[in-house]
Image (cartoon, rainbow, N blue to C red):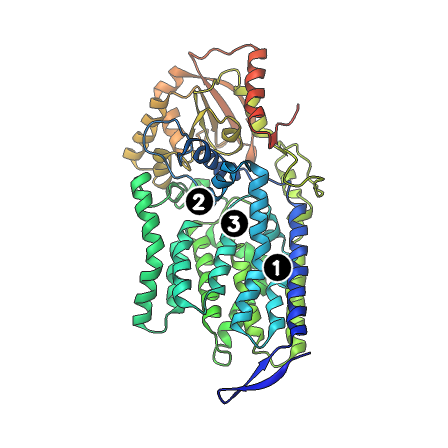
Amino acid sequence: MLGHIIPVAGSRVQVPSRRTVFVAWTLVLAATAVLVGRALLAERQTVDDVFIFLRYARNLAEHGRYAFNPGGPGTPVEGTSSVLWTLVLAAAWRAGWPGLGTAKLVSLVAGALVPATCAVAVRRAVPGRPLLAAVPALALAFDADLATWSASGMDTAFWTLACAACVALASRPAVAAVALGALAWVRPEGPLLAALGVVALSQDRKTLVRLALLAAVPLAVLTLGRLAYFHAAVPNTFWAKMNAVDGKDYTGLGYLGSALMRRPLLLLFAPAAALALRARIALGPAARLALALLAGSLLFALVAGGDWMPDRRLLVVGLPLAAVVAAITLAGAGSRLFALATCTALALEAGLTVDHTTDQTWRTHEWLDQRVVRWTVSGHPFRDPYWLDWMPTHLLQQISPFVAPGDTVAHVDVGELPYVMDDVSFLDGFGLVDREAGRLAFSPRDPVLREAAREAFFAARPAVAIVVLDEVTGHPFSPAQDAALADPRFAAGWREQGRVPTWGNHPCVTYVRRDVMAVDHAHALARMNAWLARVKDVQALQD
């Protein structure tokens, strides 16, 4: 069962039996099935940022323009966090597979490939110990964070798979270097991880230069494309998120601490053990690369200041990387019993992350979200329409009498509402898809940037402005909207239409331009129904 020994070049190499390899891959497939099952429990949960990807993908597929507002004047703004994921969704849309269900299905396929990709990485790194290839899959099978984001439709699972694939290619440094450079196409932090990965794969200065040049090729292609199309070297999300203190819910250290407390054995002790035992255990290219990419993901989360989304999205990528390191480290364990105990502990630790996958109790903290808080597997996953949140449903009903196709809406957020109102242009208060607002979010006290954002608002003359106010200061959370509301022209040109409490009990206020008259209820209902009819993958809540 354990194989037989044959001499190779004067050494003794253990060749595993087919039965042992079969057992290993059976465990990988079984663990993957568990992961997919857990993901299906969270399939009904939707994070509104996926709708940013979908609006870009729809505009690219239908209008041939990578832009949030395809008919708007000026240079398009790159407001997505993944070029490649947007292109994948646009291709699916073009092929007749549009909408949220497709995004969730494709991301689930990417997430389901992660355990097998990790198994390949371990198998290549430790060819004589095939059972260790199953360690990452078992360590990830019950992980709620990976499962939830695998069914999210976001770029998270695709990014995680891309990083795991780079580790699987570590035995071929030149190919791995090109793959590392291509990570910039998948996520904005790709260049950071690529740089660390190239250093990890390099044996000397000559190798470092050669691998760096190979990694630079896909990055250079992307950068030149960005400069030519968007007139910017980095995506607008850099400006909107990297220094927007008011938009963060976590500090970098707090975010890291949250993830490390959630899976300390996998994310903390396994990498620490690998580094501590590196004198006894030869850390080959796969282990070094996995450690480098893990360090890069932790560093990015620290510098970015965390993320508002649940289930530690930015650090999901670290889970399989740490699992690969754990498996390779166990190859040096003298006791198989110790290896089995460690693998069991990793699986049990993952099971303790059950909270957000099977019971969405975190949504009860936002009382305005009236969707159910406990999910079961849908009878038709990825096909049944998904409920919109309470807030976009409310706003759709509130502003439909005042907004006609072709108008502009200034919204503090972008997500579900712009996806539904596909023929309406949007200004984004926090600057994800709005160039001037994004620059101001990065430097909120810069008077020149403040003036530019203010003038962009008045030049657009939005029919409606949706603003979230800080209940303590009375000022908008968005620096761009704060600049506009402080101008006397706003009070003269817009009137308050209504307000409701939102996150943190802060008021969400809707302003309507004074020269815009409301249509009657029948016409407003017809507008709303027309918007919803074009997006059959979502449905609004009923009052």
> Looking at numbered disc 3 in the image, what kind of residue is underneath it?
Thr
Q: Quadrant of the C terminus?
A: top right
Residue 81 bears which disc, if any? 2
Question: Counting other residues with Cα less than 10 Å from the Cα at mark 1, is it few (<14), some (14-19), or many (20 or more)?
Answer: many
Q: Find residue 29 and report its horizontal and vertical position in percent.
A: 65, 60
User: From the viewer's perspective, is residue 516 above or below residue 410?
Assistant: above
User: From the viewer's perspective, is residue 200 above or below residue 160?
Assistant: below
The secondary element bearing badge 3 is classed as helix
Question: Counting other residues with Cα less than 10 Å from the Cα at mark 2, is it few (<14), some (14-19), or many (20 or more)?
Answer: many
Residue 114 bears which disc, if any? none
Q: Residue at x 37, y 60 (%)?
A: 195
* Distance between the alpha carbons at the discs numbered 1 and 2: 25 Å
Circles 1 and 2, Cβ within 8 Å, touching? The answer is no
Taking 542 as reference, is 526 left or right?
Answer: left
Q: Find residue 331 and report its horizontal and vertical position in percent.
A: 57, 76
User: From the viewer's perspective, is residue 350 above or below residue 388?
Assistant: below
Q: Is residue 197 visible?
A: no
> Looking at numbered disc 1 in the image, what kind of residue is underneath it?
Leu
Taking 2 as reference, is 496 left or right?
Answer: left
Question: Counting other residues with Cα less than 10 Å from the Cα at mark 3, is it few (<14), some (14-19), or many (20 or more)?
Answer: many
In the rendered structure, which disc, 3 or 1, sits on the residue that comes first in sequence? 1
Outermost residue to the bottom: 10
* Distance between the alpha carbons at the discs numbered 3 and 1: 15 Å
Q: Residue at x 64, y 74 (%)?
A: 339
Residue behind mark 3: 156
Q: Find residue 210 and report its horizontal and vertical position in percent.
A: 31, 66
In the rendered structure, which disc, 1 or 2, sits on the residue that comes first in sequence? 2
The secondary element bearing badge 1 is classed as helix
Residue behind mark 1: 140
The secondary element bearing badge 2 is classed as loop
> Looking at numbered disc 2 in the image, what kind of residue is underneath it?
Ser
Q: Nearer the viewer, residue 425 or 280?
A: 425
